[in-house]
Image (tube, grey):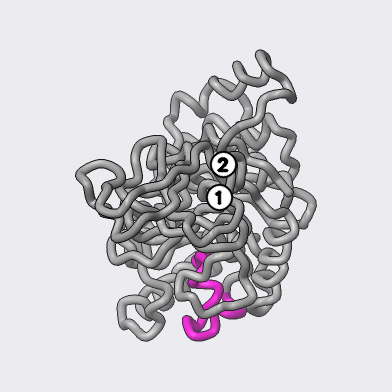
Amino acid sequence: MFKEWIKRAFGRQYRPLNKVEISASTLLDNYKVLSSIGQKIHIAPVFKSNAYGHGLVETARILDSRGAPFFCVDSLYEGYKLHRAGIKTKILVMGYVDVKNLSFKKLPFSFAAYNISHFLNLVKYQPHSGIHIFVDTGMGREGIPIWDLKIFLKKIPDRYIKNLEGLMSHFAASDKFNDLRTKSQVVAFKNAIKTLNEKNIFPKFVHIANSSGLLNNRKLGIDGITNVARCGIALYGIDPEEKNSKLKRALRLISKIVQVKTIKKGSTVGYDFTYVAKKNIKAAVLPIGYNDGVDRELSNRGEVIVRGKACRIIGRVSMNITTIDVTGVKNVRIGDEGIIKFITPSKTKIPYEFLVNLNPEIKRVVI
């Protein structure tokens, strides 16, 4: 990969123009805040999609010694990457795993099972692994339909009951706790627990809540019923409902100014002439664009912080270049850092999209 080639060629001498900073202290503070919510609900950090853009291995290392019941990833690839990095916390692979990939070697993971054939393949090739039964309580995506759960359990050979480590589901709209469909999901999940208990199956881990599910756990009526919440977006400091002021963003996307110039009144900036200077302004060029994660939707409205001042993005965000108005910044010069405020209120995008679209090739730096 490019990063490895750069490391071999330049070693510690290489200075990237763009970087993603992750605050270890902020991430740990968020984990502590979330851990204080609910009645004995433990936090299982979610590291899928490169830890929501924060860096899979980097963030997992920060939380590895904090006593989480397990880490959540989507794929076998992500799980194995953490394993190779020396992560000690148990790992739950929530996504589907191709049976051929299960047959090569013994894997140190737990897995989610969506149907009986998936379950039987998991225990056939990984008989030592813990299995989390994924029930579909109303989301309509992956999972065993709640009405098929009893049939599913009947098809499990008795010798594999010991593998049933967890019961899990997923809310479709955990922020809409008064919606009858959300309430029906809670009822369905409670029935799933009851169904397992009637078979003398008492999973160690019971979890349905995501970040919003945890933040609304009492309103949803799952406090005291579940013992784990799978937290992703809130762990990284973003409350999807923007109500929890204790959560702080753990990430900063930083670039460096590579040119400062004057744009004269009437001149345009960027593709399609979308910005026209109404007066003479001072502009700065940053070597970062939508290839790196500065969404094109931020054209002519996003902001970059330079020397503590908010500078508006002017013109279209290009593939590798973004231009900003630095007229109000004193003594701005080449080499100054610009912190991109890339999560901006939008009618068409959610914060998750801005985060996961951060280019994984950008250097992640833990501070």
Q: Which comes before the other along the chain, label 1 or label 2?
A: 2
166 w.r.t. 360: above or below: below
User: Which residue position holds label 1?
Assistant: 338
Q: Secondary structure at mark 1?
A: strand
Label 1 – label 2 distance at C-alpha: 6 Å
Residue 58 shows in the view? yes
- Within 10 Å of disc 2 (Cα), the crowding (few <14, some 14-19, many 20+) is many
Three-letter amino acid code at the position of disc 2: Lys
**Of residues 278 and 143, which is closer to you in this image?**
278
* Residue 184 forms part of the magenta stretch: no
42 w.r.t. 352: above or below: below
In the image, what residue occupies the spot 65% across and 70% down?
A: 34
* Residue 209 forms part of the magenta stretch: yes
Q: Magenta residues?
A: 206-225
In the image, what residue occupies the spot 36% across and 48% down?
A: 263
Instruction: Report x, y in % for residue 105.
Output: 60, 23
**Of residues 262 and 243, which is closer to you in this image?**
262
Three-letter amino acid code at the position of disc 1: Gly
User: Which residue position holds label 2?
Assistant: 256
Quadrant of the snapshot with the N terminus: top right
Identify the residue at the far left of this view.
272
From the viewer's perspective, is 308 left or right of 326?
A: right
